Image: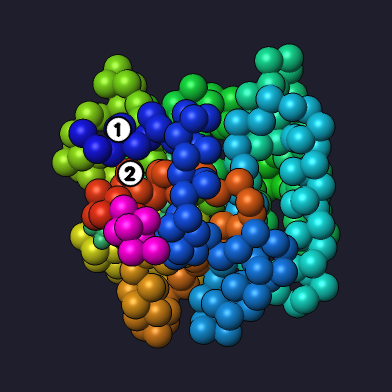
Amino acid sequence: MLGPTLLTASRSPRIRRLVSDAPGSRRLVQRFVVGETLDDALDAATRLIGDGLSVTLDHLGEDTLDVNRAGATRDTYVALLGRLADCGLAAQAEVSLKLSAVGQALPRDGHGTALENAYAVCAAAYRAGTTVTLDMEDHRTVDSTLAILRELRHDFPSTGAVLQSCLRRTEGDCRDLAGAGSRVRLVKGAYAEPDSVAYPDKADVDLAYVRCLKILMAGDGYPMVASHDPRMIALAGMLAERHGRAPGSYEYQMLHGIRTGEQRRLAAAGERVRVYVPYGADWYGYFMRRLAERPANVGFFLRSLITR
Ligand code: FDA
């Protein structure tokens, strides 16, 4: 029950203020979020790339209802991509973009605004020599996000998308996106969803992940296996072998601060491993989803408040 409660709390402004102001919050947040500034993000990316990993950078923020803020987020990504190119990091560093941060949730033409802003980010990524992956948010955004993906791929074919195995529709989406040139990051899903659209039991989400992974690995696209689950990681290796996929024709992805030893073990074994690196001041929603995924994190969080 704790997970869904935390996910509901992740959208409450009152709890946001409480958690954000709590003196011990910062310490646990630092495990998942590399810092607030662009320089913090570039330092983390440089360190990880030096360790043989690739990265995807996420400027934290979501659900904006302010068109100026959506434009500012677009500009932040464009600046980030310029710096990645200037620092010579673009070959190993791409960006992850939440469409709700660039306008998708706006009441008037959110879809069009998000498309326009995402297009500018993809163009900046193209100039820098790297790619963009569109994060996936709650189920109400999936049709719009996939439609924007289709538009973007006309001009920027390597734009990637995230699909969530928790959603009942996702096997079909995997089939649609398993073709040549497609980049799909497969995740289990981090949002509270109604049973009508998502599997309520974790065991079913895991089984759906297996089915989706089989579709993507058998296809001609580029699967991005985004999971910390040892069973999914082992299965991806077996499927890669079965389908004659060499390392580099797929990749593993994990979040910053989670199973770092496993990230390095896979990279040392010759696999491509990409770490999702979030930065920025607006860490609350991201942090609460990380707490919800693992109730033990709540214990760490509460202890960090007490032992301060
Ligand atoms: P599972 O939850 O079964 O965890 C397996 C094991 O991993 C756990 O037993 C534990 O050891 C470790 N673990 C997992 N989460 C942890 C945590 N928070 N703290 C500590 N240990 C933890 N979701 C989404 O809806 N939209 C998106 O765009 C993305 N993007 C994304 C990118 C990348 C690169 C990753 C890795 C994940 C996402 N996610 C996401 C999140 C995803 O949906 C999912 O919530 C988490 O990855 C946890 O699921 P696992 O597959 O790791 O399995």
- Residue 275 disc label: none
Which range is magenta? 302-308
Residue at 26 percent of width and 54 percent of height: 299
Q: In the drawing, does residue 193 fall left or right of residue 163?
A: left
Helix, strand or loop: magenta stretch:
helix
In the image, is residue 232 above or below residue 92? above
Q: In the drawing, does residue 127 fall left or right of residue 223?
A: right
Residue 130 placement: quadrant: bottom right
Which one is nearer the viewer's eye here, 49 or 245? 49
Q: Which residue is mark 2?
A: 292
Q: Amino acid at mark 1?
A: Pro
Reply yes or no: does residue 303 show up in magenta: yes
Residue 116 placement: quadrant: top right
Residue at 36 percent of width and 60 percent of height: 304
The answer to whether residue 285 is visible is no
Which one is nearer the viewer's eye here, 206 or 289? 289
Q: Tag 2 or tag 1, which sits nearer the N-term?
A: 1
Which one is nearer the viewer's eye here, 166 or 38? 38
The answer to whether mark 2 is within 8 Å of ligand 1 is yes
Residue at 30 percent of width and 32 percent of height: 5
Q: Secondary structure at mark 1?
A: helix
Q: CA distance from mark 1 to mark 2?
A: 7 Å
- Tell me whether the residue at label 1 lies in contact with that at label 2, contact meaning CB atoms closer than 8 angstroms: yes
In the image, is residue 16 above or below residue 37? above
- Residue 4 disc label: 1
Q: Amino acid at mark 2?
A: Ala
Q: In the drawing, does residue 114 fall left or right of residue 140?
A: right
